[in-house]
Structures are given as structure tokens and as C-alpha cells.
Image (cartoon, rainbow, N blue to C red):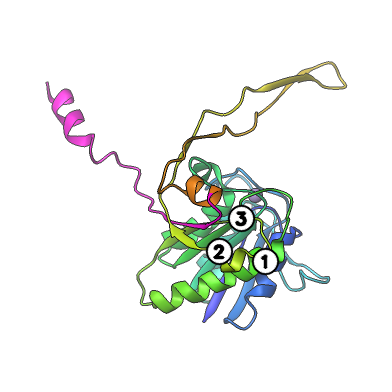
Amino acid sequence: MRILIANDDGYLAPGIAALVRACQGLGEITVFAPEQNASGTSNALTLGRPLNIFQARGEGVQGFNVVNGTPSDCVHVALTGVLGHRPDLVLSGINNGANMGDDTLYSGTVAAAMEGYLFGVPAIAFSQAVKGWGEIEAAAATARSIVEQVLAAHPLDGTPFLLNVNIPNRADAATLPRRVTRLGRRHASEPVIQQTNPRGETIYWIGPAGDAREAGEGTDFHAVASGCVSITPLQVDLTDHAGRPGWAERLAR
Ligand code: MN
């Protein structure tokens, strides 16, 4: 099995090193990761300039392919020629913080996995529920265990899937129950933060994500709050299928 691993926190993030270490022995692993932290870049591709790739050196990152672009760039260039083969599986993460509910639309971690999925490769995105890398080794062991469980249940027969996994920051993460969930919803983001920079100009920081608004039974928020690992199967089709007949009727008048 050949595994492509990417992330959005950048190639020096502890989460990707831990994931790569934990997955040793599962197959042939190749890493393509952004040079800089590219969290919140969603599915962006870099189209206005060329990309450079260099091989990282050093403990924990030796041989990582480092791309001066976005998470989607990393997987895209790997799959469209740089890697030289089609991987059997794309893994992304482990992200520094949750990717639940609306986060999935903004997440570079989910986007890197989605890029694989869009090319027909099964893909799994992993995130820790809380920022700060607490219990990252346990999260990485959990990620490996989930990969093994998923592959045992769903052989890689060419049917792609996209799973979004959120792991509680706990030393016993690998033994926690695993729930297959749906995405919850967040409240709208907190207000923008206005400041003055040292040159007297007004600047704005995007505010933090809102708290969970729809976090009922069955959601990713609920599973993680209940001490479970959340596994949400995702799809890409944004069509409002239920609303389509209504729109067709209204606009036909
Ligand atoms: Mn991130």
C-alpha cells in the first residue's frame, strides 16, 4: 500500500510528524506538506505563481516534500505528476484543533484529504479536538488504528471515500468509542477584531470561530463532548437537492 500524507499546519508541525511515525509499517509513506502554516485556506490552489518543492532534512521531517503553497497544492502536485504514482490512500493531519461542523468548509486539513478524494483516492482527515498538541502521540496511535479499522472494513477497491476524524486530546484516545457522526453547526464567527498597527493604520483580525449551535445527538460536536472519537463521512456535492424543485418552479413563472 502506498500512502500520501499531507497537512495544513506546515511540515514542521508536531501533528504530521506524529502521524507519519504512527503509520510506519502500514505501507510506503510519502509526505507533501506546506512550508508555512496554511490553516483556514480551504481548497485554495496557487495559480498566480509557480510552486517550489524541497526535501526537508532533520529529525522527524527527513525526506518530507515541502511545497511553498496550500494544502490542496501539496496533494494536487503530488497526484498530477510529482509523486510519480497513484497512492492507495491520502491521509491529512493531524490538525492542531478541531475540524467539526462548519470548520470543514474552511479547513485546509479537510481540503488536503478532499483533494485526494476528488482524484478518486480514498482519504481521511485527522484533527485533535483541542489546540496545543496535548496527547498528540495518543492521537497518532488512534489515527493509525482507525486507518487499520477502515481498511479492514472497506477494502481499497477503487471506490473513494472521504472521512473526517476528530480525536479527543486524551491519553486513552485509542480505546475511546468511535462514533460515525454527521456535521453539527457552529454559531456565526465572533466579531472582527480592530486594532491599530505600529504605523497608525487600522487593521482587522478575523475573530475566532463561534461555539457549537447544533450539537445534538449524532453530531461530531456531541460525540467529542461525550468522550468519543468522531468519524464523519463527507461528500462534496453542495447542491441543495431538496430545494431544487422549488427553485425550478419559482423561476419558471
Ligand atoms: Mn490547521
- Cα gap from disc 1 to disc 2, whole angstroms: 11 Å
Q: Which residue is mark 3?
A: 168
Q: At x 28% / y 38%, what residue is drawn?
A: 240
Q: Secondary structure at mark 3?
A: loop
Q: At x 45% / y 72%, what residue is drawn?
A: 150
Is mark 3 in CB contact (under 8 Å) with mark 2? Answer: yes
Does 126 sit left or right of 20 as displayed? left
Does 228 sit left or right of 201 as displayed? left
Give the quadrant of the C terminus.
Answer: top left
Does the numbered disc 2 mark a residue whose Cβ is under 8 Å from ligand 1? Answer: no
Q: Which residue is mark 2?
A: 176
- Cα gap from disc 3 to disc 2, whole angstroms: 9 Å
Taking depth in this image into account, of 29 and 226 the one nearest to the observer is 226
Q: Which residue is mark 1?
A: 138
Magenta stretch in the rendered image: 226-253
Q: At x 53% / y 51%, what residue is drawn?
A: 226
